């Protein structure tokens, strides 16, 4: 009886089982057993309201603008209701879509779930207590004053920490500055250096907020003279 019940659950009324039937059944079983996956599925289906199985950037933008539940899940602490008229909101949503899609024009459910599984684990793994010489600090250059106020960075370097500067990004304090295109550069530096802390100062805080909102970094963050864009910390930080 148990075998008959399982067969029926997988195939429905069909007399033969395809690989697609098998995969769909057990993928859904895993979703039902994993709260994070179940939440991802629910939000994905809210975005993919017409059931096409994939999401275009336009559909993604519309869902972020009109559905607070989607907005809260994708960019916690943000308000994307003005995404089509607010450049900062648009950049954050656009960068998130690009990050999920990985260069593709449409997002499928696997892309969506994989992204948010990684976002949920972005905090660096705890390391045993050790000397500060083993601690890594990544400093985002703009706003930290390496040239204008060199003592600020030297204090961290001379304290004995391992320090890496991200300098290949422009000053973000410009009218209508698009943050999104530069977050990938910072993420690549994070992946390579594997910092314990990301440090920003003043206008560099714009980049930190972008990293938080897109899930590129959710670990410990040092903010000096926090930028006005930083109005709320992401949930769980």
Image: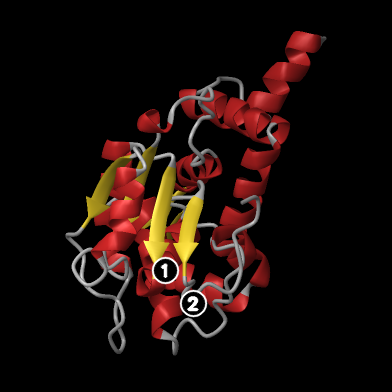
Q: Is residue 232 left or right of residue 18?
A: right
Which class describes the residues within 10 Å of circle 1: few (<14), some (14-19), or many (20+)?
many
Residue 123 at what x, y percent from top left?
Answer: 51, 40
- Nearest the eye: 87 or 198: 198
Quarter of the figure with residue 49: bottom right
Which label number is shown at residue 72?
none
Name, please, the residue furthest toward the right: 1
As displayed, is residue 90 above or below residue 224? below
Tally of numbered discs: 2
Q: Identify which residue is drawn at 41% across, 51% down.
A: 198
Residue 100 at what x, y percent from top left?
Answer: 40, 52
**Residue for badge 2:** 229
What's the image's color scheme?
secondary structure
Residue 24 at what x, y percent from top left?
Answer: 56, 32
As displayed, is residue 164 above or below residue 69? above
- Nearest the eye: 104 or 224: 224
Q: Identify which residue is drawn at 47% across, 62% down.
A: 223
User: In the rendered image, which quarter contains the N terminus?
Assistant: top right
Q: Secondary structure at mark 2?
A: loop
- Nearest the eye: 8 or 187: 187
Q: Identify which residue is drawn at 63% across, 72% down.
A: 67
As displayed, is residue 39 above or below residue 227? above
Earlier in the chain: of badge 2 and badge 1, it is 1
**Residue for badge 1:** 205
Q: Is residue 176 left or right of residue 10?
A: left
Q: Is residue 69 left or right of residue 44?
A: right
Q: Secondary structure at mark 1?
A: helix
CB atoms of marks 2 and 1 within 8 Å: yes
- Nearest the eye: 61 or 125: 125
């Amino acid at each position: 009886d148990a075998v008959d019940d399982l067969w029926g659950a997988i195939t429905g009324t069909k007399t033969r089982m395809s690989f697609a039937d098998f995969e769909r059944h057990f993928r859904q079983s895993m979703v039902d057993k994993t709260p994070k996956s179940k939440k991802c599925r629910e939000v994905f289906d809210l975005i993919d309201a017409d059931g096409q199985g994939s999401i275009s950037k336009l559909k993604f933008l519309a869902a972020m603008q009109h559905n607070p539940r989607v907005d809260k899940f994708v960019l916690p602490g943000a308000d994307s209701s003005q995404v089509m008229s607010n450049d900062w909101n648009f950049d954050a949503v656009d960068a998130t879509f690009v990050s999920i899609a990985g260069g593709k024009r449409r997002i499928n459910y696997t892309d969506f779930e994989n992204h948010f599984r990684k976002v949920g684990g972005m905090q660096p793994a705890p390391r045993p207590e050790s000397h500060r010489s083993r601690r890594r600090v990544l400093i985002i250059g703009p706003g930290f004053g390496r040239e204008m106020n060199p003592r600020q960075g030297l204090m961290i370097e001379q304290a004995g920490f391992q320090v890496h500067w991200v300098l290949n990004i422009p000053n973000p304090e410009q009218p209508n500055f698009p943050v999104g295109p530069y977050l990938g550069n910072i993420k690549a530096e994070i992946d390579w250096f594997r910092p314990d802390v990301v440090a920003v100062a003043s206008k560099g805080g714009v980049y930190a907020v972008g990293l938080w909102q897109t899930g590129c970094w959710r670990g410990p963050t040092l903010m000096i003279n926090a930028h006005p864009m930083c109005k709320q910390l992401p949930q769980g930080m």
